[in-house]
Amino acid sequence: MAINLDKLREKHLEMNKTGIQRNFMDSFLALKDGSQYIRILPWKDEDKEFYAETKIHRVKLADGNPKNFHCRKIHGEICPMCEAYFGLWKLSQDKDDEHANKAREIKPRDRFYLNVVDRETSEVKILSIGQILFKKIVATIMDPDYGDITDLENGHDFKIMKIMEGQWPKYDQSSPRPRPEPAGSEQDVAAWMDGLHDVHALVKVEDYEEMMHVAQSYLPSLAKGVDVEDDDDYESNLEG
């Protein structure tokens, strides 16, 4: 029986893709329940911030699998998912109706990427966090008692406290360590800085056509064109 080269080629591509995805996800720090210590690293030069900022639309594809899309507005581009989001709120008559629930599902949410040293393994990982935890980090840096906690000589380690409340994690108790200390030995620091992940490259411009196809599954009228207002206050207007 002859080998089906086409099917074998498809399987080969699938396996390679899965391997690449797994290796990519291994670059991220897995936040465990309880306490976890990290050292936030500076960027390698001063032309960019130590963090990268984006907004994520988390959607459910036709096959039921979730997928994250970077909001195209971050790059000043038209974002079909935002058009669907605002369009759904415009159609909504109640804060708990079908349109409102769909809108909340695809709401663009702030996301921040940072390079950190995982103190448990001493590896450089990408920390992916939302607005609440990032605000805590920024507030710490703005506090004169701490200052630039990313400083490699006089910075501070940071304790992330993850406490689950229902299905949602809380990070309210996260805080920097009180005393400043060097990040590590000269050899460790050199290796960490050489191993920085390009967090800025993670914020990509998504393909418009692909996003539009998914956006239309949430709001079919986008296929005909829908007049939406760019107003992020639909939900509070409904509640009021």
Image: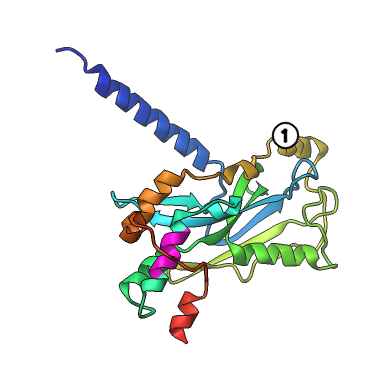
Q: Quadrant of residue 145?
A: bottom right
19 relative to 222, above or below:
above
- Whether residue 93 appears in magenta in the rendering, the answer is no
Secondary structure under tag 1 reads helix
Residue that appears at 38% across and 58% down: 225
- Whether residue 87 appears in magenta in the rendering, the answer is yes
Q: Judge the density around disc 1: few (<14), some (14-19), many (≥20) Cα neighbours within 10 Å.
A: few
Q: Nearer the viewer, residue 62 or 185?
A: 62
Residue that appears at 74% across and 38% down: 193
The residue that label 1 is drawn on is 194
Residue that appears at 54% across and 44% down: 205
Name the residue at the bottom extreme: 240
Name the residue at the left extreme: 1
Residue 117, how many percent across, how many down? 67, 47
Camera sees residue 51: yes
Camera sees residue 124: no
Name the residue at the top extreme: 2
Residue that appears at 14% across and 12% down: 1
Q: Nearer the viewer, residue 227 or 35?
A: 227
Q: How many tags in the picture?
A: 1
Residue 190, how many percent across, how many down? 77, 35
- Identify which amino acid the numbered label 1 is placed on: Asp
Residue 198, how many percent across, how many down? 65, 40
* Residue interval drawn in magenta: 82-88
Q: Main secondary structure of the magenta part?
A: helix
Residue 169, how many percent across, how many down? 51, 66
